[in-house]
Image: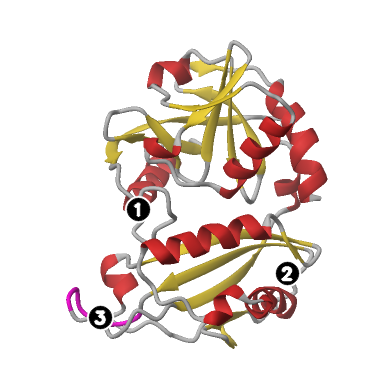
Amino acid sequence: MRQELYINFNGKVIKNEKPIIYHDNRSFRYGDGCFETMKILNGKIILEAFHLERLFTSLQLLQFNKPNYFITNDFLVQIKELAKKNQHRKLARVRLTVFRGNGGLYDVENHHPNYIIETMDLNSSSNKFNENGLVIDIFKDVRKAYDKFSNIKSNSYLQYAMAAMWAKENKLNDALILNADERIADATIANIFIVVDGVIKTPAITEACVGGVMRKFLLKRLREENYSVQETSITINDVLNASEVFLTNSIYGIRWVKQVGKSNYKKQLSEILHQKFVIPNFL
């Protein structure tokens, strides 16, 4: 018998098959909102403070009226309680979607943040280093613009959705996204790091990448441990000529990339960093 699952809609737990979005919902119409993807392990939200910081920054940029309960422990309790109800406390992915509600482009009902919390089973492989490596390539059909919204996880996710479809059609594990100057921004569900002459490089926030939670955490830890790190611009050639490439996100931590296009990469520093920073904080 299939397990019955639930979601949390504006603080109320309901069955996940119950319709809750109307035709004039602004997230559906315009992508008006943002989302967070989090990992729960043994009842704990991994990198909880980093996720909340990004969520609050996104709400401010999107001009939501932030209610008090968004900054209280009660909101986090709702996430954990839903995971418990869905029997996802041991290992799960959480998606928190925030949206403005109903209305047209110029006649929004209000700026109150509505939200949906979902929890989903997560395979135990998400806790392990990917020994086989990822095979990815560069998606060249879109260019991500530079603006003050570039770094948030917006509900307007068309570029990434098209890149993910392209990657799947081409039997790839992920795809890299270019910015308006045809430099590397990020991947569909991750940030990118490369290693060049022993220096760890990642696209700067000003390069239009999503401000990833794992990216921020890893940069902080690398600097604390005196690794040579640069947030900079990264060209396609920089990636193709790097000695090592890896992707980061809050679900998998660090994943080694063994191939981009026809370029192949060694597996060395990414595995060391996974053992040193991901395992002690994610497990």
Marks 2 and 1 sit apart, C-alpha to C-alpha, by 32 Å
Residue drawn 35% across and 53% down? 149
Q: Which residues are magenta?
A: 101-106
Q: Which residue was labeled with disc 2?
A: 88
Amino acid type at circle 3 is: Val
The residue wearing badge 1 is 149
Looking at the image, residue 40 lies above or below residue 203: below
Dot 1 amino acid type = Phe
Q: Secondary structure at mark 1?
A: loop
Query: What residue sits 66% from the left and 73% below the top?
Result: 76
Q: Nearer the viewer, mark 2 or mark 3?
A: 3
Q: Residue 169: horizontal and vertical position, in percent?
A: 40, 41
Q: Main secondary structure of the magenta part?
A: loop
How many numbered marks are there? 3
Q: Which residue is mark 3?
A: 108
Apparent side of residue 107 relative to residue 156 in the rendered image (left or right): left
The answer to whether residue 139 is visible is yes
Residue 246: in magenta span: no
Q: Residue furthest left?
A: 106
In the picture provided, is 228 more to the left or to the right than 109?
A: right
Q: Earlier in the sequence, mark 2 or mark 1?
A: 2
Q: Can residue 130 be spotted in the picture?
A: no
Disc 2 to disc 3: CB gap under 8 Å: no
Q: Residue at x 79, y 34 (%)?
A: 276
